[in-house]
Every structure is written in structure tokens, then in C-alpha cells.
Image (tube, coloured by chain):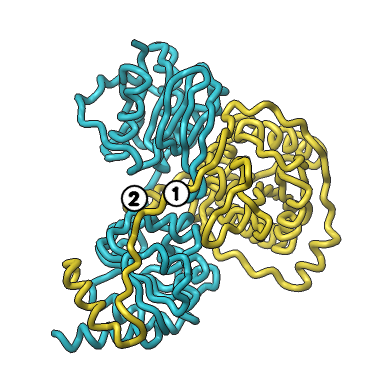
Amino acid sequence: MRVLACIKRVPITGGRILLTADARAINTQHLGFTMSPHEECGVEEAARMIEAYRGDSVVLTLGPPEAVEQLRDAMALGIDRAIHLQTDGQEWDAEGTASALTDAIRTEEGASGRFDIIFFGNESADSGGFQVGARVAHALGRPLVTGLKKVTLEGSAVRCEQEVEGGRDVYVVPLPAVLTVKEGLNLPRYPSVPGRMRARTRPVAVSTPARPAPRLELVRLAVPAGQGRRAESLGAGAGAAPAVVEMLQKAGVL
Amino acid sequence: MTTVLVLMDESDASRQALTLARQFGEPRSMRMDAVKPFAPDAVAAALARAADDLNVSAVFAPGTDRGNEVIARLAARTGLPFAANCIAATPGDPATLTRLRWGGSLLEEARLHSPRPLITVAPHTVPADSGPAPVEVDVKAPAEADLVVRVVDHVAPSNGGLSLAEAKVIVSGGRGVGSKEGFAIIEDLAGLLGAAVGCSRAVTSAGWRPHSDQVGQTGTKVTPDVYIACGISGATQHMAGLKGAKRILAINSDPQAPLMLNADYTVTGDLKEIVPAISAEIRKRR
């Protein structure tokens, strides 16, 4: 079988977000980067499927030259090769992203055959647009199931469990399909040293699509005002226990 | 006045979406469960048809999983841009809006260049509309092709325990708890308080707790009366899940940890001494 995982490079924001001087981006000078958490589970699931059923796995991203780090991370988890749609670091909106990914998927499928499953994260950690997977699925004319916490192959179909209030809704759709997943789908493995070594030598196909004018156009970012919590000290160490219990009584939970 | 279409269910989030929708025109509504069992492509198709029939100026939905999913499908189908999780929006060409990023840790001001803005409204960021319910639009029988993706079964939650999302008290542990076994003192205190046990992403990534215990942007968003955070630094990933907590008590050895600065109450020191001391104090008073 053939499986594709689509990922996005995002900063690891830590405790406090700082913006650039023009307030159009996060100041990432002192930050590390990762792939969005939901997508990491998509990568892990793709790797497990190929381990179980054999075949070919590919990871795809649209992002700056440095996003090759996240492609290598995905290959360290077991993905065979990568496609990198390189940008100049400017943000792309969801429509432009989906359109470039769709073109790249069509080209790849034309050369090497159809993907049975294409994984996306349910939403990216940073821009949270909730739509790239839906746009790609529609453009390719494939069924889409979103927000998945469990995915099971059943012959030429896939059984999907979607997290909803009060449990999970189940869908069974024919392959090929597009699935968007959420963290908790699996526990991604910690990449092994041999995995990392192997990832360095795996092929990354690079192209540079043109960025269309965004129709959802970012003007500026802002850090929301704090919630005005007072951070009242109840003391230090075990001696603070009586004050904590009094607070719990006052709050009516004890 | 122009007409707008609002996708609604029984949730507060739907009536909050209605509040923003009224700024764009006279609302008509479609039910989220217009197609049963739920088939998101069929709902999106019905919205597309109704939007054309009524020549609506915008389509709104709650920024819930269901709302975002259906509007994303509508956007794909109609080739229109879509702004998810907005907290403010003003009609115009372009429409201007403010939306949440990073699970609410960052705000984005944006322009939406579209003949028919598609907008979802972030839950609990806008007051709920208390006006009359909008008139519902009729929904025709869906096409077969739009029923390929439909709910065929439902699985009840696996743990019969307390639901994090609904818990009134949560005792939560972070990296500072140190190990899977270290959660014994967290569970003991939670048991005394009738509380749910929560944790940070660092803990689920380490495999100490199941993902269903994770509070945060990619875990559960919680709304307890009291949230007790033990050994959690307070990365934006975690804080994004805490905005609905009434009171936060942070226990941490680092008084400068972001969660200590953004809590209502703090105790500085080693949680391995403090948490058992709180449990002992509760037992003593019983």
C-alpha cells in the first residue's frame, strides 16, 4: 500500500509568545521547531501501516528551507522519502497551501501510483485553519474523515473513530481516503539513532511553487491580555497545606 | 438588509455564532443534524444550496469540531476562503476579523477577501444571542455521493471514570511529577477531592499517562471550579486548555514558572512534599 503524511513546521512556543517588530509573525530567534502534534501522530500511523502491510510511505510539507528538519524527523520515525515544497518563509493561507499540496500529490501519484491513505493533522498548531485536509480531499475527489483517534484498515475500506462529546462516532469509508487525525491516535515512537542516521540519507524532492495572493490575509498578530489572575502565595513547602485546604473549602469543593 | 445563513445545534457556541452573524445580516438557520445520521458532506451540500437560493452574504457556524468540519467542506466545495475560530468580524470588502491562533494563545487580525465570507466563531469568546431563533431553511434529500462519509456507529467512552471536560476539580501533574509511579500522590489527592486526574503534554509524550488525561491545546479544554497544577511549567500548549478554569492553584519549585505567574494561588516548593501534606491535612480534618 502507499501512504502519505502531510506535516507543517511550527515553533515550540514555550511559556510566552514574543512577536516580531512588525507583529506579523512570532519571534522565533530563540525557539526550536517541531511538526504540529496532531501531524506527528499521522506520521507515526503511516509508518506503522507500512510496517504492517508493506509498501511505500512519503512525507510532504510546504515550508521554508529549514522545514527539511521536520521531514528528516518524519523519516527518522520510519517514512521512506520526502517531498518539500519550498517557500521563502512567508506564510501561505490555507487555500494556497491546499492547492500546492494537491498539485504535488497529483504529480507524485502520476509517477509512483495512487496513495491509499493521505494523513493530515486535524488542524495546525499555529494558524489552526481546520481546512487544508478538506480542500485537498475535495480536489482529489476522495472521502474525508476528520478528528480521528483510531484508524483500522478493513480490506479496501478504513474504519475511523472520531472523537465527539460522549464517546466516538464511527465511519467506514472506501479507499483511497483522506484522514485528519488528532494527538492521542497513537504514542509516536522516540526516533532511534539508526533511524536518525537512515533519515539523513533518504531522498527529499524539492520544488518551489509560486505563492498566490492570500484571500485570508494576515494583517497583524497580538498577544491577548492576561486573565488577570493574582498569583496569591499560600506559602512554601508542606507548611502551606492548611492554607490550601482553607482555599479549597472557600471555593466550595471540599 | 442582506440574509446570512447560520449552522446551529443546541450548544451555547451556536448562539454565540448567531451574535456575530447578526452583524452581517438577517439570519436564517440550518440544523447541524439536518441529515441523520450525521453526514458532513451532505450538510455542506445543503448549506451550499441554501446559500445560493437565499443569496446569502455570509455563512456562520460555531467553532466546534463539527462546525469547523462542515464549513471546511463547504469552503472546499464552493472554492471560497474560510476563517475559523473568529472572535470578532465586521462586514465589508474585504471583511475584517479577529481570529484565534495557537488555541487562543495568540490573536490574528485578518482581512477576508470573499464574495461570501465563511466564518466559524470560537466558543465562549462572544456573548450568546438571546433574540428569537432564526427561521430554519428546508433541507432536501441528500445525494448518494454525499452520504459516503456518514456516521455508522457510536462507541461509548472507554473509561467509565470522571470526564475531564466536565470535572469540577482537577488535580493535574506535569514533568515535575518525575515518573509514572509519581502520580500515586496526585491520584490520592484527587480521590479525596472527588477530582479527575489531568496532566500536561510532556507527561503523555513520556507515556506516563494516557492521552485522554491531557489538558491543553491538543488535549482537553477544561472548565473546573479548581484546577491544581503540580509540577507543570505552563507552556502555551497547556495554558490553552485552562482558560475556562475558575481558580488555578499552582504548585512548583520554580516561582518564575509561567503557570506560577498565571495562577490565582501558588505554593512554592517540592510537590512530592506538598501534595501528600495537603492530602494529610484533608484527612486530619475529617
**Residue, disc 1:** A162
Cα–Cα span, label 2 and label 1: 10 Å
Identify by letter the chain in yellow.
Answer: A
**Residue, disc 2:** A165
In this view, which residue lies farthest toward the left? B286
Few, some or many C-alpha atoms within 10 Å of disc 1 (few <14, some 14-19, many ≥20)? Answer: many
Q: Residue at x 58, y 39 (%)?
A: A133
Q: What is the secondary structure assignment of the residue under circle 1?
A: strand
Callout 1 amino acid: Gln
Q: Nearer the viewer, residue A175 or B17?
A: B17
Q: Chain B in the picture: what colour?
A: cyan
Choose mark 2 or mark 1, whichever is in front. 2
Q: What is the secondary structure assignment of the residue under circle 2?
A: loop
Image quarter of residue A106: top right
Q: Disc 2, disc 1: CB below 8 Å? A: no
Q: Quadrant of the C terminus of chain B?
A: bottom left
Q: Where is residue A86 drawn, in percent x and y?
A: 77, 42
In this view, B177 is above or below A61: below
Q: Quadrant of the N terminus of chain B?
A: top left
Q: Which dot marks residue A106? A: none
In this view, B223 is above or below B206: above
Callout 2 amino acid: Glu
In this view, A138 is above or below B106: above
Q: Left or right: A72 with respect to A92?
A: right
In this view, which residue lies farthest toward the front? A21
